[in-house]
Amino acid sequence: MSSTAGAFPFPRTGRQYLSGLDDGRRVVVEGRSVRDVATDEATAGMARELAGLLDDAGGAGGAGDWLSRAYSLAATAEEVAARGRAFEAVARRSGGLLGRSPDFLATIVTAWAGAADHFGPYAGNVRAYWAESRDARRVLTHAISDPPAGRDDGLAGILRIVREDADGIVVRGTKMLATLAPFADELLIYPYRPLGEDEQARAVCFAVPVAAPGLTLYCRPSLAGGGGPLARRYDEMDALCVFDDVRVPWPRVFIAGDLETANGLRAGTEMTAYAWHQSSVRAFVKAEFLWAVADRCARASGRHGTPPARSALGELAGIAETLRSLVTAAEAGSRKGANGHRICDLTPLACAAMLNSRLYPRAVEIVQTIGSSGLVMHPSPGDDAPSSEAREFYAEYFSRETVGAAEHGRLLRIAADLALDRFGARQALYERVFVGPPDVFAGKFLDIYGAARGPDSAGRGPLAAGGGEP
């Protein structure tokens, strides 16, 4: 194993992951430094979830198979589908609420390893990093977006190389918006947009430990401390990553100043097909979770059999099934890619990404409709305590033949987390802009669809026969 693999044992347990979070990383939340991500109220719940996921990676089958599958290069359609089922097992642990579960970045590193020659002189670095990350069970995330235009200098400017020497490169500037960053072992950095001829210093791709000297994570306010049951467990946090002359050793450098390699990263490695496979699976699992919550809320309130509730639930079921079917189509249409490995059909995955940006907010609206006033007026955990003055009344008010008061209250708190509180609002915004502005991505999908259909597609069928409106 290369010396760049890191100090933690191979492979790690969840407990070892948690103990490693007290490594000197600089994490700032609401104006204060978080000493230990594993124990701080703002971050402890999410850290425990990731620890459990890493422990599952040691098992066989189900969620335990996620690690080997996420880091696998497929040779057959069956292996592509198996990778999808591993993504599904991971997503079902959180109901699809974790947009940056570790399998997401694992797919990107795997795509790079399968196309390592794209990186030219750094191909060996990419292959070694892929193997090390797999064997170490690294928790990875990325920071790829640039700060707003006009900030070209200093730490608030776009991340860039400021010098090179025999030991590596030194970078300065900011990357945003790194989801999961406080909990990650390492950050992957690469360009989000095409770079111009005068942006050679910004043509970088590398991996760096979150605890690297000079790197600070400025986080948004935590949603976990006073949040509901989902927020306490699944607030994966988002952060600005500020690099104050951070040194990146050459073994962790994958692109350094090469505009052509940087601008061709996505097409040259086919990484989009890998990443969108994982995110599309997560999208349908998340839609199914919202349907299950809405269905149970309708049953608990006694409205499940009413025509309005049935109509709303049917629409939500249709959203989930549409997204699931697109994944099935993408896996069934898998093909041998340009780099020799089997990849999903990109068109259904792009369609899922486009539709989910619109359908997820609609799914949240349906949960709001079904939950109705119960999302506003629901019992708190304290109301269930034996000493609570509200317990006796709420036990009668929220208890029905189909569900007890305690379970009904918990169900409403989960629904409120999804559809009413800041956690749910952040989830909806995340899905809305996951692949960029929805209108812009719809135009991109048109190009993908047109390329897949071919230039002669409009000349076939009823249009060619001069029939009525299509």
Image (spheres, grey):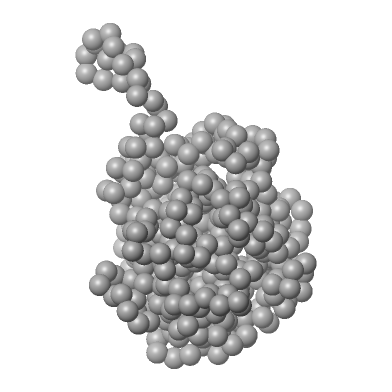
On the question of residue 394 being in view, the answer is no
Which is more toward the observer, 144 or 279?
144
On the question of residue 156 being in view, the answer is yes
Question: Residue sitting at 77 percent across and 67 percent down?
Answer: 1
**Dividing the picture into quarters, in which one does residue 160 lie?**
bottom left
Above or below residue 43? Residue 179 is: above
**From the viewer's perspective, is 197 left or right of 185?**
left
Question: Residue sitting at 37 percent across and 55 percent down?
Answer: 194
Which is more toward the observer, 261 or 443?
261
Which is more toward the observer, 24 or 99?
24
Number of numbered callouts drawn: 0
**Dividing the picture into quarters, in which one does residue 146 lie?**
bottom left
**Dividing the picture into quarters, in which one does residue 250 lie?**
bottom right
Above or below residue 194? Residue 246 is: below
Question: Residue sitting at 46 percent across and 50 percent down?
Answer: 264
Q: Position of residue 240 (x, y in %)?
A: 41, 76
Q: Position of residue 446 (x, y in %)?
A: 32, 37
Which is more toward the observer, 197 or 436?
197
Q: Position of residue 251 (x, y in %)?
A: 64, 69
Residue that extends furthest to the front in the rendered view of this protein? 166
Q: Position of residue 164 (x, y in %)?
A: 52, 75
**From the viewer's perspective, is 465 left or right of 14?**
left
Above or below residue 151? Residue 115 is: above
Question: Residue sitting at 22 percent across and 18 percent down?
Answer: 469
Can you say which quadrant of the picture contains the C terminus?
Answer: top left
